[in-house]
Amino acid sequence: MPGGGIEQAETIEDALKRELLEETGLEVKLVRELGVVRQPGRRDPDFRHESHFVHAVPTGPTEHEWEHFIEQNEIERGLVRCRWVPILAGMSVHGRNRGALLDALLRKRVVAFVTRGTELLVFDYEGLTELPGGRIDAHESLEDGIVREVEEETGLVNVRVVEELADAKAFERLYGRGAHETHVFHLVTEAETPDEWDHDVAGTGMDSGLVYACRWVPLDECPPLWGKPDPLVEVLRMSITDE
């Protein structure tokens, strides 16, 4: 991963921007500081070497892979190949402590079961029936994130979180381990909506600009979700019926 020393009179943000530009050619902006790792020196155990780990994002679009010639850094001068890879739990990278706080970048994912009476909100895209959901931002709570995702993917704004249907451990038991920690919520709406509508997806995610065909379906007749019967549909149906 990109990184290097902080020069005299430089701030952490200044050093971040300089190192990324030198080593990858990318212009970036700081999102947050993840933490500091301190190590005793090799010759002097009382000397502590500090490594500041920060989260940054590019200021503009990038290629998935590209080559960059490092010329301003005498230690690492030469041609390098840069690429994006998924962030996974337990992944490692070369270099002492370079991946120390990678797990802090694992983003949580939320999925919404939105009901209107005994009907469930779904959308169809490329032959699959899906539910609203996505990854939450670093500053968001799970509840704020799921409300935002519902609005971005379906246009529905008047929704209320009822309960968490499955936390991360329950989700893993039901569906298996995934790349992200996933939480499933039940939300309700009393807003007036058509039975079917098309929605242009908003936000900054990978699905931004796509068009989702949204519709309400009876829970008793729920189609397979993401191509498979969903075990939480029956749990939700029974909880609504019991009420």
Image (spheres, grey):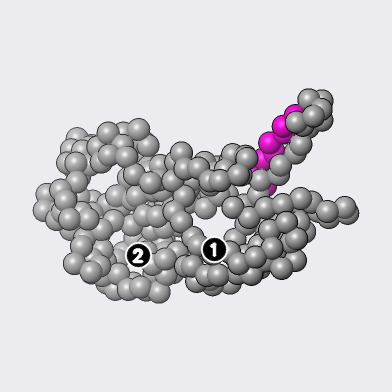
Taking the spot 62% from the left edge, 39% from the top edge, the residue there is 97
As drawn, the label of residue 232 is: none
At 76% across and 56% down in the image, what residue appears? 15
Circle 2 sits on which residue?
154
Crowd tier of the residue under label 2, counting other residues whose Cα lies within 10 Å: few below 14, some 14–19, many 20 or above: many
Inspect the image, locate mark 1, and give the three-letter code of the amino acid beneath it.
Cys
Q: Residue drawn 83% across and 53% down?
A: 7
Relative vertical location of residue 232 with respect to residue 1 in this rendering, above or below: above
Q: How many marks?
A: 2
**Which residue in the structure is indicated by mark 1?**
82
Q: Position of residue 216 (x, y in %)?
A: 22, 61
| Residue interval drawn in magenta | 31-40
* Number of other residues with Cα within 10 Å of mark 1, as a class: few under 14, some 14 to 19, many 20 or more: some
**Where residue 171 sits in the image (x, y, percent)?**
31, 38
* Foreground pick, 20 / 120: 20
* Near-viewer residue (194 or 50): 50
Say whether residue 164 is magenta. no
Rendering coords of residue 230 (x, y %): 19, 46
Name of the residue lying farthest toward the left? 221
Mark 1 secondary-structure assignment:
strand
**Residue 77 vs residue 235, the one in the foreground:** 77
Q: Quadrant of residue 61?
A: bottom right
- Residues at marks 1 and 2 touching, judged by CB atoms closer than 8 Å: no
Q: Residue at x 46, y 50 (%)?
A: 87
What is the CA distance from the residue labelled 1 to the residue labelled 2? Answer: 36 Å
SS category of the residue bearing label 2 = helix
Magenta stretch, overall SS: strand
Q: Position of residue 137 (x, y in %)?
A: 52, 53
> Quadrant where the C terminus lies?
top left
Note whether residue 174 is visible: yes
Task: Say what amino acid the circle numbered 2 marks.
Answer: Thr
